[in-house]
Image (cartoon, rainbow, N blue to C red):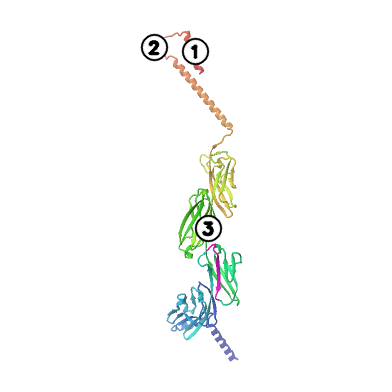
Amino acid sequence: MRLVSLVLLLTFTLLVFSAGSILPGAAAGEQKVWAREGSSAMLPCYLSPRKQGRIWKQPSDWTSVLWKRHGGSAHQEPHVVLEVEYTGLRKTALPMRPRVSVQDSALRSGNFSLRIDPVRSGDAGLYEAQVAYSTEVQSCQVELGIVTVTLSPPGPVVEGEPLLMSCNSSHRARLMETCWFHNGRPVPTTKDFYSLHGALSILQPSVSDSGSWHCQLRYSDNVVVSATHDLQILGFDGPANPVVYAAAGSAADLPCTLSYLPSAFGINAVAAHWSHLAGGHLQDWIISQNQSSRSFPLHLPAVGPDDAGRYSCAVPVGSKTMRRDVTLAVVTVTPSIPGPISEGSHLLLTCGVTHLQGHERFQWKLLSSAPTNKKGAMFTSHNLKDHRSQTGRTLDISQVSQKDVGIWECSVYGPEGRLGAVEYGLQITGAQVSSPPTIFSGQVTFGLTVTLFFLLMVCILALALQKRARIPASYPALEGIVAVAVPNKKDVEESQKETIQQTEC
């Protein structure tokens, strides 16, 4: 009984040893590896750790590996793909040089996997590796299947151009179903996306369709093959029809930015052509950039209402031309009083926008007011007792006063936030007096009274000086001599009359 048990134990040990001599990827069974055309593939072949240990114990005996391909059909003879001899000499088949390789650092650790980079559609088939170490030879068999994702038309995929994306494999069974996924989400069949026989038709591709596309093929023998393709669509960043809001008199930059660098598609230089039809005259600008830039903005130093309208940015890519339209909306302020504005006037300020979209909202705000004291202090809208802010296109000021003087701002808002703003400086020329105040009337009366009294005093003083000038002056040296002239009656009457007339003046 003990002898039977010992025999069974030895038999089980031998079976375990035989099964563990070659890991998955070796001769214990054939493996299938799928790879997408253009990517890299690794055909596995490993020795077991026990076999690997035996190699290290005998350093004088080196290991060699020979990879062969059995070809596309059973009638074709196997041909050498890669051979590494005991001495380290390598031999590679010309059709696959330098796409095949094995890692030198991995050979001593028992890793004889074959790397193919990049994989081509004709590389599909059965590969076999023969590993010789010491006096033993082991083999690995791996079947390489190729999945191909092709684009039609080839070359750069341009936004708006119809695209056909096909998914095929080298599997020989009948194809039953094809499923497509975009960024991990299933793609439903719509008028823009249509799947048929492993192909997906995209009628109007946009930049949002860029990203990871995954195709999954299910065959009649229940084999499922899949592949992933990173799709890059050359178009424009931002919304499809952008609108730029700019205040009259300010600068404006119209955007024209590509979704990818032109160098990613093998394009060395790109020139953008801007055009604008204004007043029946076509204006043109050409902006050139190198392959390291993807932005072609149009800078307008100062815009007015005549500059508003639709601008077009055209970028040629090969035989195709991409076009993006940009609308320039100019924001203006129109006062109801064209000339100077007087204090107390009724003023209306209207905020106008060319090319209204219908969703704009308007808000008025007093940014700063004029000085109201001798120190020249500047009051902002936050310092005012009443918050000078109103909504609506028109700002209604019933009676313009000093507190309304300053910079008024009209902001334009949309669903995405603030779109633009324009400023208007409000100044007044003077005061309108309808009925003078009582204090003002008293001051005028007092001033007139003082003026009349002053004139009367001047007149009296002048008469006194004139009268004094007619009286003979006394001289001390002639005190002894007194000349007395006795006027007659007629002269005295004439003199009195003359004096009365001067007094009446």
Q: Disc 1 or 2, which lies upstream in sequence?
A: 2
Q: Tell me where the magenta segment starts and ends, as one range.
A: 158-170
Residues marked 2 and 3 touching at CB (< 8 Å): no
> Residue at position x 58%, y 48% from top?
363
Against 136, is 151 above or below?
above
Q: Amino acid at mark 2?
A: Leu
Secondary element at image label 3: strand
Q: Mark 2 highlights which residue?
A: 478
Q: Is residue 163 magenta-colored?
A: yes
Q: Amino acid at mark 1?
A: Gln
Q: Mark 1 highlights which residue?
A: 496
Secondary element at image label 2: helix
* Quarter of the rendering occupied by the N terminus: bottom right
- Provide the major secondary structure of the magenta segment: strand
Q: Is residue 179 magenta-colored?
A: no
- Which label belongs to residue 324? 3
Q: Position of residue 57 (x, y in %)?
A: 46, 83
